[in-house]
Image: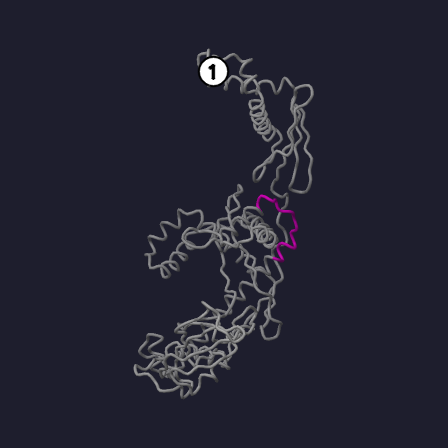
């Protein structure tokens, strides 16, 4: 047997193999004899059909089976002999019989990149922070007040001021005529809502039950205007609570809570959301810097695993199905760069874990169990027993330790968000299991979650009649 290895890039190889007729013949004979055992032809006892007849009847298909068996076994021998450690599934890219009865074939395979992570200490990264202002707190408190507004039992005669709630019928129009089947009934609108469409609010003031008017509202794609005929179905007065100590007691659940305590709680909530969001940007900046300092090609097998996990994330509903209009080719094309980035981070992360001897210890499991116990209501000891046996939890802890290690040694520039342009939309770096033979498997588990937006719903319903101004976004 002759063999030659050709390298097509840093992680891709092709193995060319040539078998002589004598080397291939045992595989052919084995295939014929196996077929003979099960052959059942008239005039012959089962298992005693002559080999020449077997070859005549089934020769083509048996020849193919023998070739496939030869490729598998000979490639396995060569992997052991040449210490080939492929990742993913090797592929037969060429398979031919030779004129003298031999066989040639080519197997394409990938291997782990031959790199050693370096320069992972002292990574440069900008850490953005936000200073919560009184205006943001006032806006959030207004949202909370609106969500706790009480509706009067008795209907009102008219919409005398903004402290009224109405229910509407909204009929879409085209060229002044109703669009059949495009009508919304019992649409609730609270005029004091901070995000109500101003034109709609102005049109509703001083209306009575049964009044109708026509209005253009930005309900189309990209805010395009659509024309509606709006009819008032009911009117009720709303009472919005004041931000005082009694309201603070109600919301915070503490008998001695004050209005100032409530403001501080809102401030802390807004600040926590910004910290969570900006921490995602910060961690991604560290990961980007690590990948830039350690360039390498990633095997397509890893990228494919990440892409498959991305596709699984897109499945919805009880049957976990993709949306009917899901464009697979487009999705793969658009997300492949992110999949490559994620795969590179997963490999480098494992190298950091191994190089720094990072381990999941009892305090890690205990801390996570306490957090999850508060979140789920399951007792800590039950969770702790499960976590200690779970490879997925171990990998989650190690992934967090790896990124925390990079943070601890990073060169950080702290910058207030008001002094810089708005950051690009955050692209989440996923933690996925790529199925390769590592001590630290890449479970489909997100070591750090990121908040991508500051649209907050505090118990009120959003609909197309409201203007979403989202004062939190910078």
Q: Is residue 367 left or right of residue 93?
A: left
Mark 1 secondary-structure assignment: loop
> Is residue 474 in the magenta section?
no
Res. 281 image quadrant: bottom right
Q: Is residue 207 above or below residue 372?
A: below
Res. 250 image quadrant: bottom left
Dot 1 surroundings within 10 Å: few (below 14), some, or many (20 or more)? few
Q: Is residue 100 above or below residue 76?
A: above
Q: Position of residue 3 (x, y in %)?
A: 67, 28
Q: Is residue 61 left or right of residue 390?
A: right
Front-most of residues 386 and 161: 161
Residue beneath disc 1: 41
Q: Is residue 471 visible?
A: no
Q: Is residue 412 visible?
A: yes
Region rendered in magenta: 288-302
Q: Quadrant of the C terminus?
A: bottom right
Q: Is residue 83 above or below residue 308?
A: above
Count of number-bearing discs: 1
Q: Is residue 131 left or right of residue 289?
A: left
Q: Quadrant of the N terminus?
A: top right
Secondary structure of the magenta portion, mostly? helix
Q: Position of residue 379 (x, y in %)?
A: 32, 56
Q: Position of residue 220 (x, y in %)?
A: 54, 70
Q: Residue at x 62, y 37 (%)?
A: 109
Q: What colour scheme governs how the chains and residues are painted in the rendered image of this protein? A: one colour
């Amino acid at each position: 047997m002759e063999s030659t290895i050709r390298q097509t890039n840093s992680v891709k190889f092709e193995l060319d193999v040539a078998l002589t007729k004598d080397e291939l013949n045992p595989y052919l004979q084995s295939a014929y004899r196996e077929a003979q055992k099960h052959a059942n032809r008239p005039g012959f006892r089962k298992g005693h059909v002559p080999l020449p007849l077997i070859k005549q009847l089934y020769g083509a298909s048996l020849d193919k089976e023998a070739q496939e068996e030869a490729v598998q076994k000979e490639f396995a021998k060569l992997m052991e002999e040449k210490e080939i450690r492929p990742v993913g599934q090797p592929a037969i890219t060429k398979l031919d019989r030779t004129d003298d009865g031999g066989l040639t074939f080519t197997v394409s395979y990938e291997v782990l990149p031959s790199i050693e992570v370096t320069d992972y200490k002292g990574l440069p990264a900008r850490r953005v922070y936000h200073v919560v202002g009184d205006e943001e707190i006032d806006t959030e408190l207004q949202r909370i007040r609106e969500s706790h507004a009480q509706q009067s039992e008795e209907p009102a005669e008219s919409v005398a001021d903004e402290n009224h709630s109405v229910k509407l019928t909204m009929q879409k129009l085209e060229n002044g005529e109703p669009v059949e089947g495009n009508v919304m009934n019992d649409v609730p609108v609270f005029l004091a809502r901070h995000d109500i469409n101003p034109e709609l609010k102005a049109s509703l003031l001083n209306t009575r039950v049964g009044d109708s008017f026509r209005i253009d509202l930005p309900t189309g794609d990209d805010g395009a205007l659509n024309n509606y005929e709006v009819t008032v179905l009911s009117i009720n007065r709303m009472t919005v609570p004041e931000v005082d100590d009694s309201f603070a007691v109600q919301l915070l659940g503490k008998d001695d809570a004050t209005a100032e305590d409530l403001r501080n709680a809102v401030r802390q909530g807004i600040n926590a959301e910004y910290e969570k969001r900006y921490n995602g940007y910060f961690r991604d900046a560290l990961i980007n810097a690590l990948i830039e300092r350690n360039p390498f090609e990633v095997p397509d097998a890893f990228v494919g695993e990440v892409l498959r996990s991305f596709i699984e994330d897109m499945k919805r509903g009880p049957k976990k199905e993709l949306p009917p209009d899901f464009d697979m080719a487009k999705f793969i094309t658009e997300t492949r760069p992110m999949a490559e980035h994620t795969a590179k981070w997963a490999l480098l992360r494992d190298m950091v874990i191994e190089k720094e001897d990072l381990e999941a210890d009892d305090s890690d499991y205990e801390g996570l169990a306490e957090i999850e116990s508060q979140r789920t209501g399951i007792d800590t000891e039950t969770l702790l027993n499960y976590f200690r046996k779970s490879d997925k939890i171990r990998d989650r802890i190690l992934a967090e330790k790896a990124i925390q290690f990079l943070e601890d040694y990073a060169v950080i520039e702290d910058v207030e968000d008001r002094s810089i342009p708005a950051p690009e939309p955050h692209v989440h770096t996923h933690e996925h299991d790529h199925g390769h033979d590592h001590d630290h498997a890449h479970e489909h588990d997100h070591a750090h979650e990121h908040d991508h937006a500051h649209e907050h719903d505090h118990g009120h319903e959003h609909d197309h009649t409201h203007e979403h101004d989202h004062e939190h976004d910078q």
